[in-house]
């Protein structure tokens, strides 16, 4: 149906109609109610109250014809406006006939267009900024090269071979002038390089050094450094407390071994002649010496930290405990 209508102008009737109306009734409705031109290839789209059916009334050079379309699922999307006739484009008409929410698509398209225009403006401003910075860098580079050449020329005049140097009073005046020019050129070159470095560092906030805050879950151990006396050493007046100046320092306490002794008191019954005691709690290795913490440390060091057993043995020996590699491997 979207390809059948080749109208010069498309109009959308915003109010629903009785779908039993034919060509004559709809023609009278267009002529009496709608204040739009209808002769010469105009087409009008009507709908029912449910929005599931539409009728298209079209005038061509040979007469008028009427067609109808119904959706099996969903409904046709209609704008909510005060005008009784709403102009349509061919693309909007194609979306309308297919049951597409063309109003939402149009709003999304407008939003995307505004976003693209805003981004293009920002990109243009970025390009202008980059071009200006590139021009400044080029000018600074040319100035640096000129100053370097000037310093080299002046040094050549001062420290050249005797056959190429000046003599007499002109030599003394020339040396004073050369020394002054060299000092001025070196000063200008140093200021230019320092300004360029400071600008590059200040423009990049990521290069600014910043000390990280120590995590809050770490155990804090306080060491107080109080004055020797609570009175002023100069006048003897009692000191008044202001505040505590806290300086945090990260320290490390190496892992330590400990021995857990399981004590099970044993009692005897004189009448039954039996011995009563509590059994040992469940162990990961029956009758084994290593506890769960040591086993976890060996496994994590080997598989998570990729520390071989031979190196672990050396580490444990520094704490005074010698564990054979074969024992750890079992």
Image (cartoon, rainbow, N blue to C red):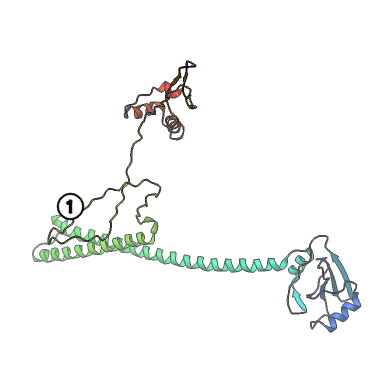
Q: Nearer the viewer, residue 252 or 307?
A: 252
Relative horizontal placement of residue 2, taking residue 198 as reference (left or right): right
Closer-to-camera residue (74/233)? 233
Q: Residue furthest top?
A: 273
Q: Position of residue 37 (x, y in %)?
A: 80, 82
**Residue plotted at (27% across, 63% down):** 191
Q: Quadrant of the N terminus?
A: bottom right
Q: Identify the element where label 1 is drawn.
A: loop
Quarter of the image where one finds residue 300: top left
Q: Nearer the viewer, residue 53 or 128?
A: 53
Give the quadrant of residue 155. bottom left
Q: Which percent across, then down, holds residue 57?
A: 85, 74
Q: Is residue 325 above or below residue 24?
A: above
325 relative to 192, above or below: above
Give the x, y percent position of residue 40. Answer: 83, 79
Identify the residue under disc 1.
228
Neighbor class of circle 1 (other Cα within 10 Å; few <14, some 14-19, many 20+) is few
Q: Position of residue 330 (x, y in %)?
A: 46, 22
Q: Residue furthest front?
A: 271
Q: Is 56 drawn above or below residue 196 in the view shown?
A: below
Q: Residue at x 36, y 45 (%)?
A: 219
The quadrant in which residue 71 appears is bottom right
């Amino acid at each position: 149906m979207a390809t059948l209508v080749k109208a010069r102008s498309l109009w959308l009737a915003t109010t629903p109609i009785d779908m039993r109306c034919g060509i004559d009734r709809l023609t009278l409705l267009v002529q009496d109610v709608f204040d739009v031109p209808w002769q010469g290839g105009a087409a009008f789209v009507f709908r029912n109250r449910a929005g599931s059916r539409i009728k298209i009334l079209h005038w061509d050079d040979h007469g008028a014809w009427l067609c109808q379309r119904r959706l099996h699922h969903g409904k046709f999307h209609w704008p909510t406006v005060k005008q009784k006739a709403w102009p349509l484009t061919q693309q909007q008409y194609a979306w309308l006939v297919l049951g597409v929410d063309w109003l939402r698509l149009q709003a999304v398209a407008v939003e995307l267009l505004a976003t693209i225009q805003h981004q293009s403006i920002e990109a243009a401003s970025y390009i202008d900024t980059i071009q200006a910075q590139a021009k400044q860098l080029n000018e600074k580079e040319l100035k640096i090269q000129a100053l370097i050449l000037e310093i080299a020329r002046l040094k050549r005049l001062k420290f050249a071979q005797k056959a190429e140097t000046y003599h007499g009073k002109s030599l003394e005046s020339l040396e004073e002038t050369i020394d002054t020019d060299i000092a001025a050129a070196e000063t200008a070159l140093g200021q230019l390089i320092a300004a360029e470095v400071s600008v590059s560092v200040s423009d990049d906030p990521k290069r600014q050094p910043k000390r990280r805050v120590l995590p809050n879950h770490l155990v804090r151990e306080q060491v107080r450094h109080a004055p020797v006396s609570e009175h002023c050493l100069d006048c003897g007046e009692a000191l008044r407390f202001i505040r505590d100046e806290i300086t945090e320092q990260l320290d490390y306490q190496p892992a330590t071994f400990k021995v857990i002794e399981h004590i099970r008191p044993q009692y005897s019954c004189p009448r039954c002649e039996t011995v009563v005691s509590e059994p040992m709690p469940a162990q990961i290795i029956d009758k084994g010496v290593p506890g769960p913490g040591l086993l976890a440390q060996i496994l994590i060091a080997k598989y998570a930290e990729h520390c071989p057993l031979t190196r672990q043995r050396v580490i444990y020996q520094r704490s005074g405990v010698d564990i054979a590699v074969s024992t750890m491997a079992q």
